């Protein structure tokens, strides 16, 4: 009679139920694993054989057939070692027949019988909870798996520990969840001198979750301000923390099962490939855009990224998820990020003017900026010119406001958005201004006659796309929320809010032909 042990197969951050069936049959002595497994699954035969030898057990002199069902679901990874070994122990009579009925098992085996760490322990524990079962995972992953809540967790160090537990010789204690730790210290916005317009744009981007682009010469503080964005963002909510931690668990980045409420900040180098940004590889690991889920993806030197890599981000920025296509299935990872980018106006960095300029303007500006496609630029809500910092700016005392004061306004603005979404019955995904769409956007951002007239006139003069129109309205809604955060009341969208939103919305970063707007002068 075959023995069955429940395990899981990962498809992105989602775990599917899999049954590891083991049967001893007559015939030639062999160890066969079937069920659409990859190379790591096929190699589990030798790891199981070595682990048994390390414990002093020998495999039966029969034909051993292992089936990972359903057979048409792709299986990847070494975490099938443990369920195969445990099912084999049940067949051999080492473990009771019903000992493992209430558990999902996953883990890699060492040749001495120890159980090695695995990636994805937290999603595995959550999947076990949805099955109404407990989880047996490696000791190193026990504190991580314990975050799944009221799920029975066993975290043995070796196969011997499992045998002793189920035979009552040494009962395993359930592991405690890891700690909620503080992330790395974030630099303070008070250290940035000058650049008041850019800091205002940074505050608006943080309040509404909008995408942001800084354009300016080297040394103007673009990267410096982007690195201070996490310090003014509100902490992760409990739901966001669980979502983000699942992705990080799949990447094996949760150290000792510790979590943090700081929002992720990922800054990949401009040499990163498309697979590095969006995910992929042999086992379709999450990419940088997924590791930044519910946080910030910072792309410095934006035009230096390959065009293919940049354009691969267009769909995730719109849909909030990334799809890695394979021949026989698709793998989805969440990718709801806030994009912040920085770039020089041209290759020399000075826009063709000033000391160090190449003297090839305006051709060098057009050539350099055309490396970023128009559709990609259309997805960036705020595009800010960052001028060089002058000696007079450097001589000024530190600004009166730092990250703490700005973060308080950002938090108040986000609370206004959350309360408005609750009142209107919107989903959590539509609560943030940057993600509002369709009827949800119409409910949160009605325009009065004057505001609509200004936006219509601007759209006609600057060829604003439909996406650009929507993003302008979202941006104006955030500006109004920041204004309302000072009084504690929701502020309607007025003409001045649309006017300021248009300041930040241009069809290309340095296009002099696009009409410029200002809150003080709202006429074209």
Image (spheres, rainbow, N blue to C red):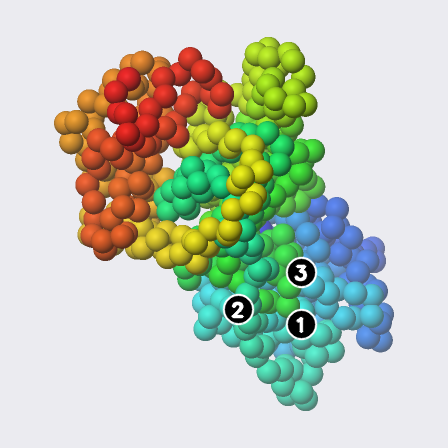
Q: Nearer the viewer, residue 267 or 485?
A: 485
Picture quarter with the C terminus: top left
Q: Position of residue 101 (x, y in %)?
A: 55, 71
Report how far apart the C-alphas of labels 3 and 1 lie in the structure.
Answer: 10 Å
Q: Position of residue 235 (x, y in %)?
A: 44, 58
Q: Is residue 353 left or right of residue 189?
A: right
Task: Look at 56% across and 45% down and name the residue there.
Answer: 395
- Residue 118's tag is 3
Q: Is residue 5 above or below residue 496?
A: below
Report how far apart the C-alphas of labels 1 and 2 lie in the structure.
Answer: 19 Å
Q: Quadrant of residue 522?
A: top left
Q: Nearer the viewer, mark 1 or mark 2?
A: 2
Q: Which residue is mark 2?
A: 180
Q: Quadrant of residue 110?
A: bottom right
Q: Secondary structure at mark 3?
A: loop
- Residue sitting farthest toward the left: 449
Task: Look at 63% across and 78% down and name the residue there.
Answer: 96
Mark 3 or 1 closer to N-term?
Answer: 3
Q: Secondary structure at mark 1?
A: helix
Q: Are marks 2 and 3 in contact (CB under 8 Å)?
A: no
Crowding at mark 3 (Cα within 10 Å: few <14, some 14-19, many 20+): many
Q: Position of residue 98 (x, y in %)?
A: 57, 75
Q: Which residue is mark 1?
A: 139
């Amino acid at each position: 009679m075959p023995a069955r042990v429940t395990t899981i197969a990962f498809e992105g951050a989602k775990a599917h139920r899999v049954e590891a069936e083991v049967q001893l049959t007559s015939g030639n002595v062999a160890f066969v694993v079937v069920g659409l497994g990859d190379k790591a699954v096929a190699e589990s035969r030798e790891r199981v054989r070595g682990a048994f030898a390390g414990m002093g057990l020998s495999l039966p002199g029969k034909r051993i057939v292992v089936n990972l069902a359903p057979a048409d679901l792709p299986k990847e990874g070494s975490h099938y070692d443990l369920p195969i070994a445990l099912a084999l122990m049940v067949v051999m009579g080492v473990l009771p027949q019903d000992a493992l009925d209430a558990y999902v098992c996953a883990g890699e085996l060492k040749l001495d019988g120890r159980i090695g760490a695995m990636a994805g322990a937290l999603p595995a524990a959550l999947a076990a909870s949805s099955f109404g079962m407990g989880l047996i995972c490696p000791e190193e992953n026990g504190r991580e798996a314990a975050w799944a809540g009221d799920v029975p967790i066993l975290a043995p160090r070796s196969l011997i520990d499992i045998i002793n537990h189920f035979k009552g010789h040494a009962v395993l204690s359930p592991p405690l969840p890891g700690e909620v730790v503080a992330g790395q210290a974030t630099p303070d916005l008070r250290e940035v001198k000058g650049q008041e317009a850019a800091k205002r744009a940074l505050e608006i981007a943080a309040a509404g979750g909008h995408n942001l682009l800084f354009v300016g010469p080297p040394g103007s503080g673009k990267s410096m301000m982007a690195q201070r964005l996490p310090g003014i963002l509100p902490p992760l909510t409990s739901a966001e923390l669980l979502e983000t931690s699942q992705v990080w668990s799949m990447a094996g980045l949760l150290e000792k099962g510790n979590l943090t409420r700081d929002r992720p900040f990922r800054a990949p180098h401009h040499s990163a490939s498309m697979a590095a940004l969006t995910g992929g590889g042999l086992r379709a690991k999450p990419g940088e855009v997924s590791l930044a889920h519910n946080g910030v993806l910072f792309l410095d030197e934006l035009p230096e990224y390959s065009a293919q890599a940049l354009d691969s981000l267009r769909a995730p920025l719109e849909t909030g998820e990334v799809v890695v296509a394979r021949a026989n299935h698709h793998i989805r990872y969440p990718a709801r990020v806030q994009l912040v980018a920085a770039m020089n106006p041209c290759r020399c960095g000075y826009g063709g003017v000033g000391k160090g300029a190449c003297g090839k303007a305006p051709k060098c500006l057009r050539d350099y900026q055309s490396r970023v496609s128009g559709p990609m630029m259309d997805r960036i809500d705020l595009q800010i010119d960052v001028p060089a910092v002058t000696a007079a700016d450097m001589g000024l005392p530190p600004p009166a406001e730092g990250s703490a004061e700005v973060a308080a306004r950002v938090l108040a603005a986000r609370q206004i958005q959350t309360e408005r979404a609750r009142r209107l019955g919107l989903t959590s995904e539509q609560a943030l201004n940057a993600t509002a769409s369709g009827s949800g956007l119409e409910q949160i951002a009605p325009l009065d006659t004057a505001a609509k007239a200004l936006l219509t006139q601007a759209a006609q003069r600057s060829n604003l796309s439909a996406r650009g129109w929507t993003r302008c309205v979202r941006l104006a809604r955030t500006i109004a929320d920041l204004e309302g955060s000072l009084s504690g009341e929701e502020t309607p969208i007025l003409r001045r809010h649309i006017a300021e939103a248009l300041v930040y919305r241009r069809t290309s970063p340095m296009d002099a032909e696009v009409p410029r707007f200002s809150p003080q002068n709202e006429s074209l």
